[in-house]
Amino acid sequence: MAPPLDRHLVLVGFMGAGKTTLGARVAERIGREFIDVDAAVEPATGGDLRAFFREHGEAEFRRVEENETIRRLETSGRPSVLALGGGAVSSPAVRDALRSRAVTVWLPVDADRAWQRVRGTARPLAADEARFRALFDERQRLYEQVADAVARDADDVVLAAGAVRVETGALGVLGELVPGDGPVALVTDAHVAGVYGAEAQLALGGRLASTHEVPPGEQAKKLAVAEALWSALRLPRDGTLMALGGGSVTDLAGFVAATHLRGIDWVAVPTTLTGQVDAAIGGKTGIDLPDGKNVVGAFHWPARTIVDPALLETLPEHERRAGMAEVVKTGLLAGERLWELPEPELVRRCAAFKTAICLRDPYERGDRVLLNLGHTFAHALETASDYAVPHGDAVALGLLAALRLSGLPTDDVERVLEPRPPRVDRRRAREALARDKKGGQLVLLEAAGKPVVRDDVPLDVIHRELDALTAG
Ligand SMILES: NC(=O)c1ccc[n+]([C@@H]2O[C@H](COP(=O)([O-])OP(=O)(O)OC[C@H]3O[C@@H](n4cnc5c(N)ncnc54)[C@H](O)[C@@H]3O)[C@@H](O)[C@H]2O)c1
């Protein structure tokens, strides 16, 4: 099956479900062309659907619709977002094309609301309420059959487009959620194995081929650990590597999947807040070398990312704080107070935000750089302290600096993340910042929700902000 990045995103659902409005909005968010297939079919029918139905009958309309839909689905090149006509899924040929070429998302609507929205319009099938309701019942089964995901809003659609599934309790049904039917090798770290390993193994059932334990934390991202995995794996090309753990495990296992047999599928099951809102999304994988973090790696988008917010219950408090720094960063970029939401919703919204940016820019050649808000300062503090300053604390401080340079209030960051200036050698921090600041660029905010890349901030101003983050 084609990877999610290469597939069209197709919205299906009954008339009045909102496919066109939502489709256009999502297309803009993920940077793809939007095609309303219903509107594209219209010219072929002479522009008056009711007259066409009267003169040629519904069967002829379905034939025209089927041709147009399949032609659009089979167009190669950059994948698009398509909204299908409500009845297009009644064609077996369309259903086949959807299976092989698309991520198909069903937008359900209840019959009463749909009727309210379409009654009195020019749609030929919205003339008679009894017929409308009978058709509604008949079609539900077809939508369910073709759908890879069901969505209630734009965030759900974006997540589906990126093959990200956010579902409380998903750990218990992992076996059903892994795409394909080949064997699965499970990679997890020693802590996570003790808490969730048995449940994951049970849920994978007959598909589980082997389990591999790696050291917890950054120690997993070592060449020796990757090498041990390359040697131990006995997966065929249709096998799947599953990473169960935080960003360290998903970074490592994703990289091993990208390179084993020149690339096999992988599934990420993030267990930390950082993993669920950030690390396991977007396909960036990698390991560390003695002279730098993440210096060897690959872009390898997971066949699916399975996010179960219930797994965060056992997360130690300092790990949660680290994740909250990424949540606050996401909220500032989105211009919404996402950090105030209940945890499962906070995870869903932040995961969708990252998924959208990464779909727009999968190989980090453009907008994805915006995710670095606060990170230039954070990396400088981490490097200058030889990683004694934890990443989450460093990001919290980096956000302070970015907000001050943007001329925006810092109270949310202070209240939610409570950053404290660490003891760091200021000269080393300046040197590290000079090395990290790619092309002299800095991500700042014009306003909450309006990130910009700036290359005109004077160095002495940047240094002053960096110094202010440390206790000297
Ligand atoms: N690829 C990306 O886009 C990306 C983005 C952000 C961070 N990262 C990487 O992620 C790594 C950090 O990952 P992290 O912060 O998720 O932590 P981690 O994977 O290093 O794990 C931290 C600790 O938490 C434990 N743990 C994990 N889940 C748990 C749970 N549910 N209950 C109890 N304990 C649990 C682990 O065993 C470990 O001891 C860094 O290497 C960073 O470079 C990658």
Image (cartoon, rainbow, N blue to C red):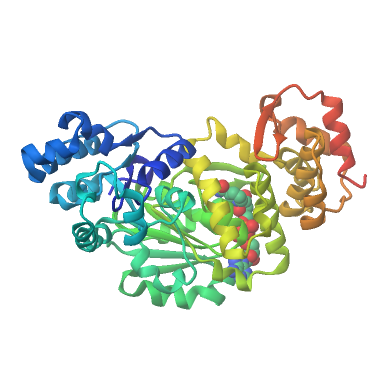
| Placement of the C terminus among the 4 image quadrants | top right
- Nearest the viewer among 131 and 443 is 131
**Image x and y of residue 281, in percent:** 51, 50
- Nearest the viewer among 165 and 363 is 165
Q: Is residue 292 visible?
A: no
Is residue 251 toward the left or the right of residue 108 in the image?
A: right
Q: Residue furthest right?
A: 472
For image coordinates 36% across by 62% down, the residue present is 178
Is residue 303 toward the left or the right of residue 357 in the image?
A: left
**Image x and y of residue 440, in percent:** 71, 25
Q: Is residue 47 visible?
A: yes
Would you identify the image quadrant in which residue 143 lies? bottom left
- Nearest the viewer among 129 and 307 is 129
Is residue 333 toward the left or the right of residue 242 in the image?
A: right
For image coordinates 20% across by 49% down, the residue present is 125
Is residue 296 toward the left or the right of residue 80 in the image?
A: right
- Nearest the viewer among 13 and 104 is 13
Placement of 243 over or under 18, stated as above or below? below
Placement of 398 over or under 178, stated as above or below? above
For image coordinates 81% across by 47% down, the residue present is 385
**Image x and y of residue 150, in percent:** 37, 58
In the image, ligand 1 is in what quadrant? bottom right
Would you identify the image quadrant in which residue 200 lies? bottom left
Placement of 217 over or under 161, stated as above or below? below
